[in-house]
Image: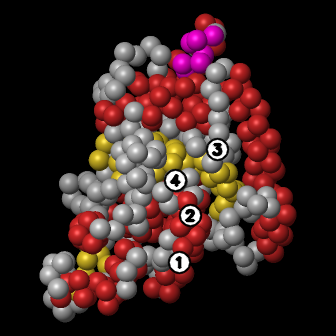
């Protein structure tokens, strides 16, 4: 069934292509310049003339934006001697929008010039599928995340687990069917205790440390449980983004999750794995302001998570639902309904992710002082 759907929504060869273009105004906003400045650089020969459609409309591709930034000396991310921010999108409960947020945040960051690595730590592999990799094709591949994490495996080169995606500045470590086996192997270290447990808890952190200079942001999508995979994610992360729908059961589950974070940090530290998060933020996901019950929960969340809750909730939208069903993000899609609805949805995501981007930039000494003034440009 999945292959049939992909054949319909992707090319006939069953692979996603990135068909994204931008007019001069949006392109200028994405690189942090005015349309006039962009046109002036083109007129002076500092930049090539943009492509034109048959109707004469000028447009730019994602690759064009990368070349423009390079030509104009626009540096967006960290400095070469700084480490990537490792952000886990984590919650105990399934169905809170974890994988959808991970995919959309990765695309947003790539559009704004960051080099992104996505690590899908969830055996369900939803994020992997959205990046056009089928987990079952990796079943005989020995260079996978599961093989790297498993204490029974001799595979130790984390960089070999990284795959290309349709996005030129997004790479992915895909999930595979063997990841659940790795969880069992890691759990088995409890019988050995001591150093075996310590190495099991630090496996992902050690792998990420070998590539942290190669990316600006590393996004972790963990399983909705706190086994050894979840603890590995907590140990590797330098920041947490916790999605919570404005529903009572999700809210109560997240209260439990927040309480458990402290307990798990203690477990990690007792096993020689200190944890220090640069930031923890809560994002309200799939929010329907027209529903009185959700408005009540939003107000409760504002009181409960004061100082942690992002100022903008992610609004529930058929545009996100339709894009996800087609294995895409909003940033890869054209409007499925009215252009106004699509624009409202995208503007909402931009506002939410601009807040996350600000937190990311505050973690790098080279950008922390300018974080407030360098983010929030709408796509």
Q: Nearer the viewer, mark 2 or mark 1?
A: 2
Q: Nearer the viewer, mark 4 or mark 3?
A: 4
- Mark 2 lies on residue: 369
Which residues are drawn in magenta? 194-200
Q: Position of residue 246 (x, y in %)?
A: 74, 63
Q: Nearer the viewer, mark 1 or mark 4?
A: 4
Give the CA distance from mark 1 to mark 3. Answer: 28 Å
Q: Position of residue 165 (x, y in %)?
A: 31, 51
Residue placed most toward the observer, 188 or 8: 188
Up-down relation of residue 235 to residue 112 (above or below):
above
Q: Earlier in the sequence, mark 2 or mark 3?
A: 3
Of all residues, the one furthest to the top in this rendering is 192
Q: Earlier in the sequence, mark 2 or mark 1?
A: 1
Secondary structure of residue under mark 3: loop
Q: Residue 186 falls in which quadrant of the image?
A: top right
Up-down relation of residue 233 to residue 217 (above or below):
above
Which mark identifies residue 364? 4
Q: Name the residue rendered at 69%, 70% in the picture.
A: 311
Q: Name the residue rendered at 62%, 26% in the picture.
A: 273
Q: Position of residue 196 (x, y in %)?
A: 56, 12
Instruction: Tell me whether circle 4 and circle 3 mark residues in contact (CB < 8 Å).
Output: no
Q: Name the residue rendered at 46%, 44% in the picture.
A: 83
For residue 127, side relative to residue 371 (left or right): left
Which mark identifies residue 347? 1
């Amino acid at each position: 069934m999945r292959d049939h759907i992909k054949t319909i929504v992707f090319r006939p060869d069953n692979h996603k292509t990135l068909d994204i273009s931008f007019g001069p105004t949006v392109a200028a906003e994405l690189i942090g310049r005015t349309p006039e400045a962009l046109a002036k650089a083109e007129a002076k020969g500092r930049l090539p003339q943009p492509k034109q459609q048959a109707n004469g409309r000028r447009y730019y591709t994602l690759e064009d934006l990368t070349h423009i930034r390079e030509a104009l000396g626009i540096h967006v991310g960290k400095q070469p001697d700084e480490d990537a921010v490792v952000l886990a999108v984590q919650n105990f409960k399934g169905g809170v929008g974890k994988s959808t947020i991970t995919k959309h945040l990765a695309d947003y960051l790539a559009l704004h010039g960051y080099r992104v690595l996505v690590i899908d730590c969830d055996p369900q592999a939803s994020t992997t599928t959205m990046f056009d990799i089928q987990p079952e094709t990796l079943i005989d591949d020995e260079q996978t995340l599961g093989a790297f994490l498993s204490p029974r495996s001799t595979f130790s080169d984390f960089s070999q687990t990284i795959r290309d995606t349709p996005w030129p500045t997004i790479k992915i470590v895909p999930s595979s069917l063997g990841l659940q086996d790795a969880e069992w192997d890691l759990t088995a270290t409890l019988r050995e205790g001591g150093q075996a447990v310590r190495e099991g808890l630090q496996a992902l952190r050690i792998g990420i440390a070998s590539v942290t200079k190669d990316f600006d942001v590393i996004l972790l999508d963990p399983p909705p449980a706190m086994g050894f995979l979840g603890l590995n994610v907590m140990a590797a992360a330098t920041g947490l983004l916790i999605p919570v729908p404005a529903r009572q059961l999700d809210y109560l589950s997240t209260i439990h999750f927040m309480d458990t974070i402290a307990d798990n940090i203690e477990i990690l530290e007792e096993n020689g794995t200190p944890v220090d998060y640069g930031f923890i933020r809560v994002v309200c996901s799939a929010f329907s302001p027209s529903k009185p019950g959700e408005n009540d929960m939003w107000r409760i969340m504002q009181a409960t998570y004061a100082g942690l809750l992002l100022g903008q909730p992610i609004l529930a939208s058929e545009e996100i639902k339709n894009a996800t069903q087609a294995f895409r993000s909003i940033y890869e899609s054209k409007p499925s309904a009215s252009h106004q609805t699509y624009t409202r949805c995208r503007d909402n995501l931009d506002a939410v992710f601009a807040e996350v981007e600000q937190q990311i930039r505050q973690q790098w000494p080279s950008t922390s002082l300018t974080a407030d003034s360098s983010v929030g440009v709408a796509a």
